[in-house]
Image (spheres, helix red, strand yellow):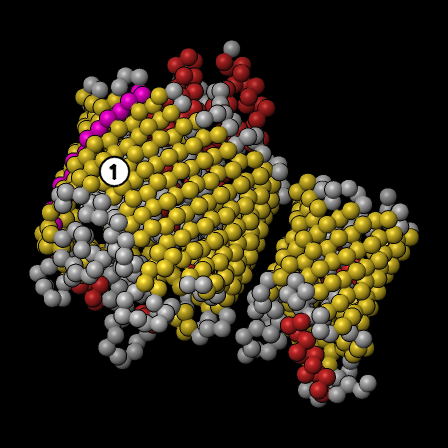
Amino acid sequence: MRKVIIFLLLTSYCTGFAQENGKQEIAFETLMEELLPILDDDINYEELYEILFEYYSNPIELNEASQEELLSLFVLSDVQIVAFFNYKKNHGKLLSTYELQAIPTFDLVTIQKIRPFVTVNQFASQHAQSLLHRITHEKNNYLLLRYQRVLEEKKGFKSIDDASPRYVGRSHKLLAKFRVNHNKDFSLGFTMEKDAGEQIQWNPSSKNYGADFNAFHFTIYNKGKFKNITIGDFNIQSGQGLVLSGGFSLGKSSETITTIRRSDIGIIPHTSVLENGFFRGIAATYSLRKLEVTSFYSNRNLDATINKEEPQKISTIRTSGLHRTETELGGKGILNEQVIGTKIKYKSDDGNLSVGINGLYILYDKVLFKNPTNYNQFEFAGDKNYNYGLYFNYSYQNFNFFGETAFSKSGGNGTVAGVIASLSSKIQTSLLYRNYARNFHTFYGNSLAENTRNINEKGLYWGLKFAPNRKFIATAYFDTFKFPWLRFRVDKPSHGYEFMLRANYFFTKRTSLYFQFKEESKGINYNPNSNPINVVEQWRKRSYLINLNVEANKILTLKTRVQFSDYVLGGVKTNGFMILQDLNLAYHKFRISTRIALFDTDDFNNRQYTYERDILYAFSIPFYSGQGIRNYILLRYKASGDLDFWLRYARTRYRNIDNIGSGQEEIVGNTKTDFKFQVRYRF
Amino acid sequence: MKIGYNHIILILFLLPYDVKAQNLFSSGGAKSEGMGNASVTVDDTWSLYNNVGGIARAENVSILLSYKNRFGLKELSTISAGGIVPVDIGVIGVSITHFGSSIFSQNNVGIAYGNKFGNTSLGLKVNYLNYAIEGYGSKGTLILEVGGITEITPQIWFGAHVYNITQSKILSDADSDIPTIFKAGISYQPIDALMLNIELQKELDFDSHAKIGLEYRLKEKFFVRAGIQTNPLKNSFGLGYYAGRLAVDYAFGTHPVLGFSHHTSVVYTLPGKE
């Protein structure tokens, strides 16, 4: 009977479900536009995007997925996940992803969103073969080679006879990446990367091994009682990410419900080109009846700046990963960090309750000591830190409670606690309370916060999602926060709020319009008359966005967007504006994406962010400040099933300025052009 | 009134005040003028000037002719002529525009092509724009414009258009003398007789301005129109009479400082294949 149903479903919905990598990329882009923190702050979106892409590009095996893994997609609601496991209990394993339509509460929009990221393999992996055989014969692999450069010459590359530091390397950026993996069996990969201005050199004493950045990992899954054994570069996600956040945080996005709660997924391989915020060593997860124990050891050399007054000590840890000048190279890998940690998780039989404890110990080989300022009085100093804490997750009917609390060596406490509830079939709500003491030091934690780090902040976030029918969906959040101590450029304890509303209307499956409004206010030093003491004033920014997506037919897709903003501080108001038009074509083996955008902002506070299409595994989320026009054209050619080519040419032409950027990055003229070329081969 | 060089200066000062349609001195037909130039979503013969994507829906050959007089000065008038021809692979259009007098004139010749893709029509136009100033000579450049119109629902239409997408300029050392202009707008037609258009236009060196236009059909053949533009605030009104193959439109516009403009245009549609 079930086979008949599947056959009927297949034939009636076939057209919507063409599965191929191109569709997965587009689905990922669309999903990311919803999940990413609202483009407004100086978060490194490109890095975040890359981590998420790595994660999403390994489809989850539905028949073996745990509740945490399904939650980690940030698409399914609790009600849907419960329905999924009930369905599997009553009907056994799924035969294909088409069967998702048969599960109650799984609407077509949700299924289309997750389908590129999940899979159902009827054929079990050939465990009978040796590991080496499986690795060398695995079809899910790729080798990626990329060349990228800014066509105009930056100051750091010119030969000028002055004392300023020059870039030691050439102006191109190169990347080589390889990965082979089989879901829940093994994963192996390496990455080699050199940024513009860096050199390729072999000099072990100064920590240079060929490319400027090398990463490697090898993971085996499900070997006896070991769920995961990893050597190389990895990340760990535990509880709500207060101590171990897996290398990323989703922040406040227009998806106001699912992104508030983190999934406890344990060890994840680190394959992005992020040069910091990960572990390098060994890690393993071991199952012991109802307990799951994960332990790891990491030994890594970090870049740092020496404290000029006390050369034995370090004043800051550098996280840019750039080693272009003699100074930057001089600080490469000079601080050794050892981390040892463990997490133990208990899960109840019915899956409704899980409780865990975390412990982390960090040891540096030099003392970290910043020169004191009024705002860094409670920051970390020393050469040792440790965190220990507790986390839980409890589901009761249509409520899901979760939380984590942790302490650091300083005695400072950090706590997050929240709840997600499906109040009716149309309304969901989320609530999250956070309190990070001004002396709470977590180096690998990244829970929801207004600041970029989990320190010196108290706040309450409330999110809502209203989806009355398939055509309309509205989300909103309201976040109020306080900073108990001073901050950089804020000379007293301060407070603020943020409010966002987004409404999305689907005229048809192929035409959709959304509108977004965001208002944010925070304190900042305001001293226009150069008085001896700074006064803290509240600034307020409002941003508006209207976006129309049109799929004209199978070949042509268009997007038009208008966004504008205003910023008020001390009674002075400035504005920003951007209008853009995209045209995308998909024809046989070619895909072409182009854009023209006009931007006009009064100042940097009104800078406009836009998300741009880019080559696979590369991400462009630039911001525009000033006046000018931005164009890009992206071409993709699928030469064969195994070979793909990408080419991207992007140009920004500014008005009324003579040079772009500053310092070594300065370009003379008013145009900046970026060129990328990439090849991907599958063995 | 004899035109002298001081009038050329006046013309150049007019530039920021009269930035309406695609380029400085063109016009988009009296129908569009009557609606405050909120016509990026309208697909008729005048799309040849207002949004080249709109020509793709044409089913018959049509010819247009238009005369616009600004502020009572003959030397500031624009004459436009053109035609669109549906062919197998889409629709082709040709336009010619002349503005000014022998002392200062702007001339434009354009060729357009448009086609339909599902619920969207797209078009492309290549223009040769030339300025001629007595005593200084003449200079021209190629300008490209692209535009499209999408039917979101039978009552709601959306259009977008970019003029001078390649940012061409006439003088090589000027930052940019021919503007790049972006227009996007929505049209709402709750009933057959009523059309309400709202549009946003942005030219890089100026603040964006909005245009709102309304058209109402009285009886079968008469149309009345009204429109408003912001930055500076201008009003316009229009009338149209459509009899069989001939469509005649008249529009009247006001400017807070410079006075009134009058615009008359005619479109003749040839019998088409059924």
Tell me what residue is drawn at x 31 percent, y 24 percent. Answer: A394
Q: Which residue is mark 1?
A: A415
In magenta segment, residue A354: yes
Q: Is residue A141 above or below residue A151?
A: above
Q: Amino acid at mark 1?
A: Thr
Tell me what residue is drawn at x 81 percent, y 68 percent. Answer: B262
Q: Is residue B128 above or below residue A149?
A: below
Tell me what residue is drawn at x 58 percent, y 43 percent. Answer: A513
Quadrant of residue A317 within the rendered picture? bottom left
Quadrant of residue B110 within the rendered picture? bottom right
Pinpoint the chain carrying mark 1.
A
Q: Is residue B187 above or below residue A122?
A: below
Mark 1 residue element? strand
Residue A611 % position (x, y): 46, 51
Residue A228 % position (x, y): 23, 30
Whether residue A657 can be seen here? yes
Q: Is residue A676 left or right of residue A293?
A: right
Q: Residues within 10 Å of mark 1 (few under 14, many from 20)?
A: many
Observer-nearest residue: A500 or B9? A500
Residue with the most extreme top position? A1
In magenta segment, residue A74: no
Magenta span main SS: strand
Whether residue A208 can be seen here? no
Q: Is residue A475 left or right of residue A379?
A: right
Q: Is residue B59 left or right of residue A171?
A: right
Q: Is residue A301 left or right of residue A419?
A: left
For the magenta stretch, what is the residue range?
A351-364
Residue B46 % position (x, y): 77, 58
Residue B63 % position (x, y): 84, 60
